[in-house]
Structures are given as C-alpha cells and as structure tokens.
Amino acid sequence: MLCNDEDQLMSKNQNKAGLLGLGKVGTNLLFLHKPEVDRFRFHWISDSKHIHRSKSPYGFSKKECIRIIKRRKLNSTIQGCDRYNFEKANEQASLLKDLVADDKANWLIFDATFTNKQNDFTIANAMMGCKAYCAANKTTWADYDLCAILLRKARKNDTLLGLNTTVGVWLNQMEIIPIIMRNVNAGQVKIWKRDNSSFNLFFTKIGSGLTVQKTVRQLEGSGYLDAPGPEALLTEVNDQTMKAHIAANICGLMQAIKPVFNDLPLTETSDSISATELANWHLEGRRSKNYPALVSTVCVDLRNASVDYQIQFTQLPKSHPLAKDYHGKCAMAIDPTTATFSWSRKRPASHAPLVRSGYGGPKRTAEKLLEEASRAAIISLRKSREITSPILVLAALEKNESAAKRLEKELAQTL
C-alpha cells in the first residue's frame, strides 16, 4: 500500500506520459525528469524493439526510469514493468493505442525517435487524440502532405502539438514562426536560418586558421557530427534541409499556401561536400569580404500568395545580419521590411531584422520537451472550443498563457 506522502504526490501527477525513443534525447529526458515536481509521470517507455510498461497505476519512479536506461540493452525483463515486443511500426502503433485507450485525453507523448517519415507518421497518427504530442523527430513534419494530415487530425482530436524541437529548440523557431504567421496580414516576410551548429563551428575554426584535419577531428571529438566519416557533412546538410522543409511547411499551412522548394545545387561551384573544398571556398569568400555559409531561406510573399524556400552554401554579404561567426551556435534572422502585422503599421525599411542565436544539443532538446509538456498539461482544449490551432504556442496565446504573451509582445515590439 502506498504511504500518505506518496498518495499526495500522485494526486499532483494527473497526466500520464509515454516516451518514444531512448537515444541521446530520450535518455537525457529521463535523467532530467522530476516526478515529484512535473505534472506527469511516465507509464511506458519504448525503444526500437520493446515497450516497457509500468505495473504500477502511478507509473515509473525516477529510479525505475534510470534502471530501464541501464538495462534495456541486456534484452532482459526489467523488474516492475511488463515488456511488449514488436518488429514493425504498425505493430508498435497498435500496442501503443491499446496502452492509452482508456483515458487517451490525459496522455502526454514525447517522441524522440528518428526512423523514416512513414514509420514516424504511423506512430504520430496513432497518438492523435492524446492531450499533447511533443515531437523531436523531423521526418514526418518535413513532408508537406503528412504534416498537413497531422495538423488537421490534431485540431480535430484536440491534441496539442509541441513542434519546437523539430527545427532547433534553442531558437524557439516553432514558437516565433507560428506567431508571426498568425499576425502577418500583408506583404513579405523573409526568414534566414543558419541552424546547423556543426557547419557554423567548422566555418569559425577554419576562419581562425585551424587546418581542415584538426577542425574535423575536433568536431568529431566534441560530438558535433551525427555520423562521423566520409558522409558526415552530407548528413549535416540533410539535417538542415529537413528543418527548412518543416519551417516552410508550417508557414505554408498557416497561410493556406503550398510551399515550393527551389532545389538548387548545394554550392555555387560543385555538388560535392568535401571538407577541404568547403574550407577553401569559405576562406576565399572571407578574403572577398563576404561570409560563405550554409543558409536556408524561406520567403513568405502574401502579395503573390507564395511560400518559396531553398538551402544552399552561399556568400552572405558583409551587411547581412547572419554574416559572422557563430561558434557552435545556430542562428536565424527574420526581416519583414515590406510586411504589415495585425499588431502594428508597416515598419520603416531601415529597421534591423530580428536575430536569434543559441547553443543546441540533446540536453537542451530534452529540457524543451519537458517544458512543452508541462505547458500542455495545464491547457485544456476540450472545455474551451475557442482554441483554433493545435500548435502549442498558439493555443497558449489563446489561453493567455504568460510566456506566450511575453513572446508575442517581444515580437510586436521588434517587428
């Protein structure tokens, strides 16, 4: 029997939570999770082959979460939980639907997986109807049609979507961009993104005089490259490309305009991504008073009802707000010089763009997922039908949540 103190503890954790993925983000999330203060407790945790479900009606304790992390690779049953095995995504989705079926509206889902867009969609689709779905995976949201389906189903089933970690948690892009898209009513908005910390650190070190070989070794040693080896740089380009797709998809879906991707050659001279060639190209650009970098650009033009975007190694002129070193950081700039917003008149062309930069990493991503879920836990869609968007920050605005209101006020004053 539970003691009175634990009974009181459980009464504060009315929401149940499930975690998908036990990689770097997932394990950081479990280490950071504090059952005694968070508004939820984990009742199941899924890796790539198994679902571990707590036998307790109150979910896993912190010690049990850590035990799962340490023992899951031993392929043995873990005391205090049931284990379900699966081979394919549809089997996993079916098991998960059964686990949340009784009180689906009280479940918070953390998705820290990375497989492929169809598998990720299968799982996300099965979780629509839960209270919130906080996603760190990218593949589904980078596909316009699948992203549109999930947004529509989330709205229909009253599921809040925490999408900030899909494109770079440290810049709050999926909070800033939806607020801007909700408030812009005419003109053009341009978004530039240097949201790959690996390349930004590469360019900084090369520019400081470090050799290519030492730079690559340092990036590998510091964990900046997802897949060390000959394909490392291409993997990083693919990562930033997916983030550009997601940002453009959210912009397009909120404006009812299908985005158009301009699939340009990656560099101005070559489609290859050799570290040596890239270093030479960057140094040559610096000597010409430019700043060569990997840049994603999204242009929302309401005058022509278009959303165009691209990603390219390009020469940023010295006057560009992102034309400088970002030592292991990600960065973005938003310039709505011709746009008008519901919060203000057309701003003067001389006004400086909004610029944000910051560090990333698995720990910060896990922290943001926990923050998103805590915010979602206190927002109810079912008792208040005036909520018009399932995107968490927009629902929070409509509920007059203080953090969302502060961000909107800051954007209104800046833009």
Image (cartoon, rainbow, N blue to C red):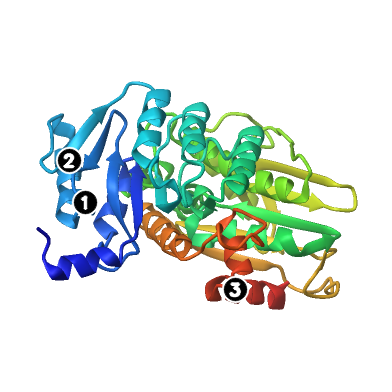
Disc 3 residue type (three-letter)? Asn
Asked if the residue at tag 1 contacts the one at tag 2, i.e. Cβ–Cβ closer than 8 Å, the answer is yes
**Relative to 123, residue 327 above or below:** below
Q: x, y percentage for residue 201?
A: 46, 53
* Quarter of the picture holding the N terminus: bottom left
Q: Earlier in the sequence, mark 2 or mark 3?
A: 2
**Relative to 187, residue 153 above or below:** above
Q: CA distance from mark 2 to mark 3?
A: 40 Å
To which residue does mark 2 refer? Answer: 81
- Which residue corresponds to the image point at 47% horizontal and 28% vertical from the top-left? 119
Q: CA distance from mark 2 to mark 1?
A: 9 Å
Dot 2, how many residues are within 10 Å of its Cα: few (below 14), some (14-19), or many (20+)? some
Residue 22 lies left or right of residue 182; in this view the side is left
- Which residue corresponds to the image point at 65% horizontal and 41% vertical from the top-left? 312
Q: Give SS at disc 1.
A: loop
* Quarter of the picture holding the C terminus: bottom right
Q: Give SS at disc 3.
A: loop
Q: Earlier in the sequence, mark 2 or mark 1?
A: 1
Q: Quadrant of residue 242?
A: top right
Marking on residue 400: 3
Q: Give SS at disc 2.
A: strand
Q: x, y percentage for residue 182?
A: 72, 60
Marking on residue 60: 1
Q: x, y percentage for residue 110?
A: 40, 48
